[in-house]
Amino acid sequence: MFGLYKVMTTKGEIHFIGRYRRDLETNNWHYYEKENGTVIHFRKEHIVWIDGDCINNIIENKKGEK
């Protein structure tokens, strides 16, 4: 499920419609898939805050970690 994300980084704020891709996450990077299929990534140390997603999606992502 896609939702509106607002990601504040040390360089500025980025808005997009997409979803978090926990399956692609690495030690240093967070990955998001935009609704057009483009994958974008953010270095974890550059993220200040993220506004987006809903609790149901977060729970579903957690289930995929097991």
Image: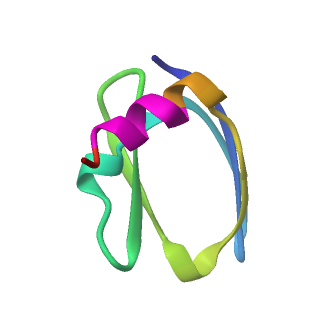
**Residue shown at the point (38%, 79%) measured from the top left:** 28
Q: Nearer the viewer, residue 35 or 66?
A: 66
- For the rendered model, the colour scheme is rainbow
Residue 43, horizontal then vertical, whole percent = 47, 74
Q: Tell me: 2 left or right of 47.
A: left
Q: Is residue 24 left or right of residue 34?
A: left
Q: In the rendered view, would you say 33 is above or below 30?
A: above
Indicate whether 45 appears above or below 63.
Answer: below
User: Number of numbered discs present?
Assistant: 0
Could you tell me residue 51's position as x and y percent? 74, 44
Q: Main secondary structure of the magenta part?
A: helix
Determine if residue 14 is in view: yes
**Left or right: where 50 falls relative to 20:** right
Residue 33 position, x and y percent, is: 37, 36
Q: Looking at the image, can residue 33 be seen? A: no
Residue, far front: 66
| Residue at 57% from the left image edge and 23% from the top image edge | 56
Say which of 54 and 8 sits in front.
54
In the rendered image, the vertical position of residue 16 relative to residue 25, given as above or below: above
30 vs 39: above or below:
below
Residues shaded magenta = 58-64
Residue 4 place in picture, x, y as percent: 65, 27
Point 34% across, 78% down: residue: 27
Q: Residue at x 68, y 36 (%)?
A: 52
Q: Quadrant of the N terminus?
A: top left
Residue furthest top as drawn: 1
Q: In the image, is residue 63 part of the stretch drawn in magenta? A: yes
Residue 8 colored in magenta in the image: no
